[in-house]
Amino acid sequence: MELEWLNSQIVDGLSELVLVFDEKGDILFGNQTAVEKLEYKRDELTECNMTQIFRQDFPKAGEHAPTFDRSRIEGRGELAMYRKNSSCFPVNARVLPTAQADVCVLLAEDVTVLRDMKLRMRELKEEGQENLRRRNEFTANVTHELRTPVNGIKGHVSTLLNEVQDAEQRRTLDIVLYCCENMLAIINNILDFSKLETGKFTIEEKEFDFYQMMDRVIATHSAEIHKKELRLSVDVDKKIPQFLIGDELRLVQVLNNLLSNAVKFTMAGSVSVVAGKTMQTGDEVELFFMVKDSGIGISPQEQDKLFQSFSQVDASITRRFGGTGLGLAITKQLVELMHGDIHLESEKGKGSTFSFSVKLRTNQQADEKQNEVYVDWSEYTNKENTEEETGLLQFGEPENRAELKKRMDKLVLSIEMGAWDKAEMLASTVKALVEKSDDDIKKLVLRMEMAIRKCNYDKSMAMYENLKAAISERIGEL
Ligand code: ADP
C-alpha cells in the first residue's frame, strides 16, 4: 500500500516509535526507532502484525492467531511492546488516524527509564519509611531503657538526701539529682521528637486550672531567675477563664522550654512572661503568650534554622550551655498541634521575644464557678523595675550606674579567671547598659568584646581599663 503522505525521513528522526498499520493490524511501516527498539529488520517489521508486537493485549486463543482489534490498544496509556526475542518494554502509546481511512499510526514512547525511576523512588520512599520506623522503634526502646536506671538513681539519691546531714555531701547529692533531672529532660525530648516525627503524638483534652498551671510554671523557674539575679515580670490577662480544656502538660512543656531558654541565655537584665486572651468564639478560646528576655539574642541567619531539629545556633553554644537542639523543634510542633503559631523576634546582643498562640476550649459551666482567687502575681512581678522601664534606663542614671558597676566587677573577675564565654556574655550586657551612651564608649566595649573573643588576657584587661576610665569620666567613679 502506498503511503504518500508519510515523510519517512522526518519520521525516522523521531525518538518515539512509529508504526503505521492497516485495519487488519498488518504493519505497513516502522520508523528507525521502532526497528532499533523492537530489534526487527525493517523488512521483517513490515511482515509483522500488531498482535505480535502487543501480544499481551491479544493473547492467542487456541490454534487460531488472534484477531486485531484497534480499540484494545487505543486510549490505554501504558502498554507492553514485545521485541523479536519475546522480551518486552513499557511504552506510553497513542493511536492516531491518518488521511487514509483504513490506515492508522501508533506513536509510542519507551518509558523503561521513567518506570524504573518511579519504581526506585517508591522503593526509596518505602526504605526511608522503614528506616524511620526502625529508628523510632530503637529510640523508643533505648530511651525507655535509659529512663528506668535514671529514675532508679533519682529515687535512691532522694532517699539518701533525707538521711544525710553533712552539708558538703548534701550538695553533691543535689548535683546528682540535678543531673538526673537534666538527663530525664533530654530523654523525654528525644522520645517526644520521635513520636512527633511519626505522627504518633496525640493532644489530650482535659480540664485544668489555668492560673494554677501558670503559677507552677513560674515557680519552676523562679529559683534559677533569682540565682542569676535577673528581674522577672509576669503579666497575665485576667480575662482568661480559670478552667480550660486542653493539654496542660504540653502547654507547660512549651512554656518551660521557652522560659528555661530565656533564663539560660540571659546573664543580666530581665525575663518577662505575658499571657493574654486574643479571641473567644463559643467555647473556643485563643490564648497568646510572650516570653521575652534581654539575653544574648539570635542573629537573623541563625533564626531561620532555629525551629529545625537538632539545631543549636552555633557549636560553641552546645559546649557552653549543653542541650540537644530539639527543644524548639518540639515546641513548634506542639504549638501547631494545639492549632497555634510560634514567632521569634530577636536581635543579637539585645535579647529575644518568643511569642505563640494556642487554641483551647472552655467549659461554660466551669467558667461560672470561676472565683476571684487568682494567683498573686505581684510576688513575681517587680513593678518598679519592669522590662519597659529598664529599657528606658538612661546611661549614667543611678540604677544604670549600679548595674554597670555590678556587671563590670563580674566582667573583670571572669577575665581574670579566664572564663571567656562568661566574659563575652557579660561584655554584651555591658554593651546593652551603655547603649544610650556616646559612640566612643560603645566602640570601646565592642573592641573589648573582640579581645575577649580572641581570649587575649592582656588586651582584654587593657581594654577593660580603658572602658572603665571612659565610663568613669562620663558618669563619675564606678
Ligand atoms: P536546646 O534544647 O538544646 O536548648 P532549643 O531548640 O531549645 O535547644 O534551642 C536551640 C538553640 O536556640 C539554643 O541552643 C540557642 O542557641 C538558641 N536559643 C533558644 N532560645 C534562645 C534565647 N532565648 N536566647 C538566645 N538563644 C536562644
Image (cartoon, rainbow, N blue to C red):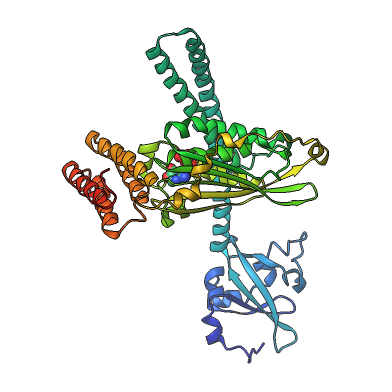
Judging depth in this view, the residue of 343 and 441 nearest the camera is: 441
Query: Residue at horizontal 55%, vertical 77%?
Result: 42
Residue at the left extreme, as displayed: 458
Image quadrant containing the C terminus: top left
Residue 421 seen from this side: no
Task: Give coordinates of residue 410: x percent, y percent.
Answer: 30, 37
Judging depth in this view, the residue of 191 and 11 nearest the camera is: 191
Image quadrant containing the N terminus: bottom right
**Where on the picture, by quarter, is residue 361?**
top right
Q: Quick check: 140 left or right of 417? A: right
Residue 384 seen from this side: yes
Query: Residue at horizontal 61%, vertical 88%?
Result: 6
Total numbered labels placed on residues in the image: 0
Judging depth in this view, the residue of 175 and 373 nearest the camera is: 373
Task: Give coordinates of residue 78: x percent, y percent.
Answer: 66, 65
Judging depth in this view, the residue of 423 and 56 nearest the camera is: 423
Q: Quick check: 406 left or right of 280? A: left
